[in-house]
Image (cartoon, rainbow, N blue to C red):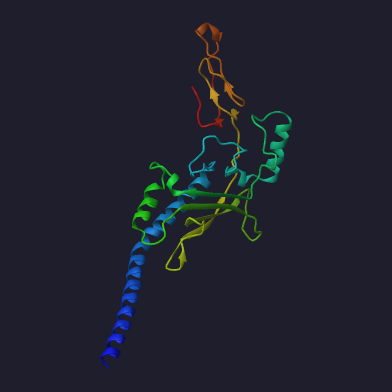
Amino acid sequence: MALATTAAGLVLSYFLSDQVILMKKQVVNNAEAPQRRLALHSALDYILFAVKQKWCLSNTLLPDLNCNLNHAANIERLLISPEQEIFLRDLQTKGLLPQPLPVGGVRLQQIEARVDVQAMSQAHPLFKVLQAMQVKSSETKIKYVFVRLRKENATSLPQSGRETFIEVYVSFQDESGQAIQFGGAKVEGKTLISAHPRELGSFALIVSGNLKMNSGAIPEAGDVVFPEFTNADGLNGSPGLIFESPVFVNRASSAI
């Protein structure tokens, strides 16, 4: 009888210990849920901002300054219409583009990026929130941030102009490239955003490269360089350079 009571007590003890461990995990997961939601929403908002700004995404999801239509992660390529691509091809045929267009086509249907969290520097906008989640997480650590931008072509989507609908998907993944799970739920999120291709109106000057107004500047393809006069006599009575409407300069840097 005593042996039976002891055995029953051991079984009950093991059962209760498992239950205590499960309950502890559940409490910890519930406490970490707001941190996970904050990290995921921060990543999603960050990518939405990148879409609105039409970045070329680098391999760490930062804006790549070496941005052109040959860039594999140029968000502008998701927004370009067939008519715009035909126009660009015509400009290339006439030799009016600073660099050749992609051979396989300018327009993209999808952009994907899988970024190792360890590759993000401390200056990265997502570093702090992801690092805080790594420290507090009691389960699987985040290995990758996965981003997918996909053009939505559904005819049911309302369109009133030249806008394009982009599905933005973000997930946190483990070492195997699978979305990590907490309490059976994947840490992933997606939303739909409309964006318009960049279009130019009436400009006094459109420069595909840099606008250089300093002496000794070495131009590259697509640059516009204005000569600098050493004295007022070179102007021949001209009032100088006057722009009566905006000037569009494609490159980020313009030397004046």
Q: Position of residue 118 (x, y in %)?
A: 43, 47
- Residue at 33%, 73% in the rendered image: 23
- In the displayed structure, 37 sits above or below 65; it is below
Give the vertical position of 161 relative to 98 (above or below): below
Q: Residue at x 59, y 36 (%)?
A: 68
Residue 103 in which image quadrant: top right
Question: Residue 75: x, y in percent?
Answer: 57, 44
Q: Is residue 135 left or right of residue 105?
A: left
User: Considering depth in this image, is 11 or 172 the residue closer to the camera?
Assistant: 11
Residue at horizontal 48 percent and vertical 47 percent from the top: 49
Q: Is residue 84 above or below residue 170?
A: above
Q: Residue furthest bottom?
A: 1
Nearer to the camera, 155 or 59: 59
Q: Residue furthest top?
A: 233
Residues 132 and 250: in front is 132
Most distant residue in the front direction: 3
Q: Quadrant of the N terminus?
A: bottom left
Q: Nearer the viewer, residue 63 or 157?
A: 63
Would you say 164 lies left or right of 174 here? Answer: right
| Residue 6 point in image, percent of width and height | 27, 86
